[in-house]
Amino acid sequence: MGTALVYDEEMTKYKLLWVDPACKIEVPERLTVSYEALVKNGLCQRCVSIPAREATEAEILLVHSEEYLEGVKKTPYMTLEDLKEFTLQYGDVYFHPNIYHCAKLAVGSALQLCDSVMTGKVRNGMALVRPPGHHSMRSAASGFCVFNNVAIAARYAKQKYGVKRVLIVDWDVHHGQGVQYCFEDDPSVLYFSWHRYEHQKFWPNLRESDYDNVGKEDGAGFNINVPWNKVGMKNSDYLSVFFHLLLPVAYEFCPELVLVCAGFDSAIGDPEGEMCASPDIFAHLTHLLMNLAGGKLCAVLEGGYNLTSLPQSVCQTVQTLLGDPPTRLSDLGAPCESALESLQCVRSAHRQYWSCLRQAAGLPDSHVSAKRIRSAGGEGERTEVGEEEKSAEEQAWPEPPQRVSPPVRCALVLPGGEAPPDGCEQISSREELHPLMLTKLREHFQSELDNCSALASLPSLMTLVEKMEKNEIRNGLAVVHSVTMAMMCVLQHVGDAPSSRTLVVCVGGGSVGSHAREDGKTLTVQISSEDTEKPTGKFYVPVHLKKGCGDASGFMQALLGLLLPLGYQYNPDLVLLVQMPNAGVCGGVWQQLVGVLQGFAQGHVLVLMQEGEQARVGPTASTLLGDPAPPLEHPLQAPLPEDVEAVETLRSRLQSDWSLLQNTGESTA
Ligand SMILES: NCCCNCCCCCC(O)(O)C(F)(F)F
Ligand SMILES: [Zn+2]
């Protein structure tokens, strides 16, 4: 299934007709440069083009009042003076004779996108629209927005398709108060927004945009605000919020549809956001959301005012929706103190609503409030003396690197005679193993080597690895006689390369410690129910879960809060995912893992399975081919306290080595 693109150049045909410094950045070129970039990068042609349409009045009335709609309906016939007069009743927005038409097209585009995804015509998609929507309220325009495109789409999906749970992720740098007001008492719509706030000093300057606004009545817990109290937030800050807040809650919420208020004023260079996250971060944010809701994801453009970073960010988003591997993010560091403080405040405010945020025994909540009070009154973090302040426009950042997709997406090494699933290539080579490799294997596997079938698939496996290194193949799956022997082979082979880094993820018990090296060429994370004898080290992380991989919520806690931060900071060039014998991992979780791990190493994921696990080959191959992982069962049980404790203990132990694991501000001594 493909990716939809909804765009109509009619939506470029309105603009500011008078002087208003607050509105001058919202120009038609925002849409044209974005669309032209998609065409230039050959992305537009790869999408399923879906026409825009005007929303009907009934659809607009799903969110807005009749009196508001009646007022806006009159604007096409207004004189310039009337338009100015009409505009004065709202804030930071302007009207134009053609804006009502465009606003109906913007809503209609979002609904067309929804239809295409919900009917299965496409898997996911993006609507390039203006005017944006997330600030507009039931009876008021605000912040360049006339109708609330995404809020209407959420109500529309619930009404027309009986969608029970909708997740709205608002990564625009402004708080979509219009969306918040619309759903704050509605537990079927989880609204998540991060936004520049600066302790209420930034527009729209609302007290209710702060983290303690968690929703009302039945909707308590279903409104998540992450305030950025400083500018200059970077990729690490954004990813930390995904790992330690949004993703755990999103998996627990288990949405049937994901809508994204895709504003790109949160990228570097934007005059509104003044943040420092690179455009390719949106490839990862999109990727991390794509395994929710069975892949049903609709991204609708909101803000974005730097005409260089906006098209780059749009392309990064669409290219990921199309299934291309995200680029590797380099030198991810620790989230900044201010981001950690916000993250800690939000997690505390939501702890009572989400079992995935259950606090391990440790800091009492009072610690947070104390910190919060001080920072509200405290001085800002001092910038280095003499560090000149660069304006957003003067910021420079590298063009995101090309994201090439290897000619072959997935290749398999299977025991003799088995045919590969559709869409996969099969690798089988007759070459002998390299004598040095044989010697190495003899050292560790004397007994098994007598059984010649043990070696049978290894030459093919080495061929597969070589083709991945040459980027001829994106990812692969090998069913072998002995996974530990195969793992040894692969690590021996890649280890010879000078600066290779392999993330080894072992699911299930069994000794893998032997190959885990301390030279940093491998980072091994083993998730199992066994206590492994090898002690935890910087490059060997045994995660002991009470029920091992059998308990979905414990596993997801380890995946999202531990494995993802480690993997992103380690930034491997290969991911080796090993299903140990009798790992007992449940299917849904396994496929989530295979899906999520493809965000690393430009998608170079090699899965090793033991013969006898053939049942798993089909689903694993489909996920490696880019099919979204099926949703986990709803509701996700609460993670076991022992598992929460285990993950927390590891995190606090490892966070000095791996700072992306941090999710709380430095504790006051
Ligand atoms: N320095 C000028 C002050 C501008 N203050 C209003 C900002 C509105 C932001 C709109 C947006 O980006 O959130 C949307 F996505 F809706 F377009
Ligand atoms: Zn914005």
Image: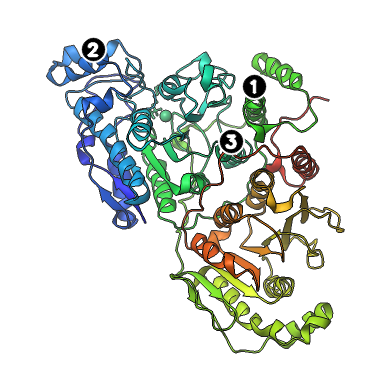
Left or right side of 524 for 4: left
What's the residue type where badge 3 is placed? Val
**Which of labels 1 and 3 is toward the front?**
3
Q: Residues within 10 Å of mark 1 (few under 14, many from 20)?
A: few
Q: Quadrant of residue 11?
A: top left
- SS class, disc 1: loop
Q: Earlier in the sequence, mark 1 or mark 3?
A: 3
- Residue 380 tag number: 1
Q: Nearer the viewer, mark 2 or mark 3?
A: 3
What residue is drawn where x is 45% and y is 48%? 295
Please name the residue that numbered disc 3 is placed on: 249
Ligand 1: give its quadrant.
top left
Foreground of the two, 245 or 493 = 245
Q: Position of residue 405 (x, y in %)?
A: 45, 64
Q: Which residue is mark 2?
A: 86
How many marks do you count on the picture? 3
- Label 2 sits on what residue type? Phe
**Which residue is pictured at 45% across the width and 51% down the height?**
399
As helix, strand or loop, the secondary structure at mark 2 comes to: helix
**Residue at 52% in and 20% down:** 218
